[in-house]
Amino acid sequence: MLSALWIIFLICALASDLISGAPYCVGTAALAGAARGAEIALSISGALCLWSGVNRVMEQAGLLSRLAALLRPVLGRLFPVSACDETCFSLLCGNLSANLLGLGNAATPLGIRTVQRMQQHSGSAGISDELCLFIVLNTASLQLIPSTAAAVRAGLGAVNAFDILPAVWLSSACSVLAGVLAARFFAAVTRR
C-alpha cells in the first residue's frame, strides 16, 4: 500500500513540474534533500558514537551496576518478577540508563534482550504486565541528556543545542508518569 502511495505522489510531483514549467524541480529537490539527510546522519552518528562510548565506559567501570543498585528500590517495585533475575534486571537497568542518556538507538539491543528474557519468565504465549510496562517506559523514555536531539539541533546549526534541557526533562517526566499510571490502570482493569 505504501509503495503505491509513494508512486502516486511521485507521479503527481512530476506532473506538477511539467505543468508549472520546471521539469527538473523534483529531481533537484530530491538530490538536495538526500545531501542534507546525509549531513544530518553523520552529525547524529558522531554524537551516538560518543555517548555509546560513554555508556560502554560506564559499564566497564561498574557505574551501570551502581546505577542498577540505585534504581533497584524503584524498579524492583515496578518489576518484581524481573528483579529476581539478576541478568534480566541488569539488562533492564542498562536499557533505561541508555535512554536516560538519550541513546535510543544504543538502548535498542538491550531492550530486545530484556524483552526476550522477560518472555522466558512469563511462561505463557501472551504478554505479561511487566513486559507491557517495560515497553511503555522504554517508549516514554525519561531523558536526562537528550544527546540525539541535541546532535540533530547542532547539525542544523543551533547555537546552543542543549538549551532544550528543561523542556525535555519536564515533558519526559510527564510522559513516563502518564505511561506508568496508564499501564497500571489497564493491568488492573484486565485482571478483573
Image (spheres, rainbow, N blue to C red):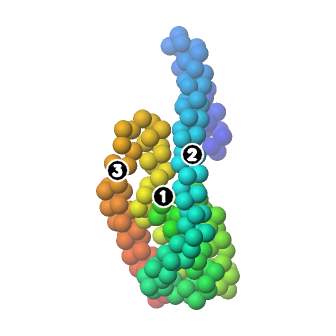
Residue 35: x percent and y percent? 58, 29
Label 2 sits on a secondary structure element that is helix
Q: CA distance from mark 2 to mark 3?
A: 20 Å
| Disc 2 residue crowd, few under 14, some 14–19, many 20+, Cα 10 Å | few
Which residue does the numbered mark 3 point to in the structure image? 164
Q: CA distance from mark 1 to mark 3?
A: 13 Å
| Mark closer to the chain start, 1 or 3 | 1
Label 1 sits on a secondary structure element that is loop
Instruction: Say if 35 sits above or below 43 in the image.
Output: above
Q: CA distance from mark 1 to mark 2?
A: 14 Å
| Mark closer to the chain start, 1 or 2 | 2
Q: Can see residue 34?
A: yes
> What quarter of the picture does the N terminus occupy?
top right
Give the residue type that dot 2 points to. Gly
Residue farthest toward the front in the current orientation of the protein? 61
Instruction: Say if 26 sits above or below 50 in the image.
Output: above
Instruction: Say if 82 sits above or below 22 in the image.
Output: below
Which residue does the numbered mark 2 point to in the structure image? 46
Which residue does the numbered mark 1 point to in the structure image? 102
Residue 24: x percent and y percent? 59, 15
Q: Residue at x 58, y 77 (%)?
A: 90
Residue 96: x percent and y percent? 51, 69
Give the residue type that dot 3 points to. Ile
Along the line of sight, the residue nearer the viewer: 79 or 130? 79
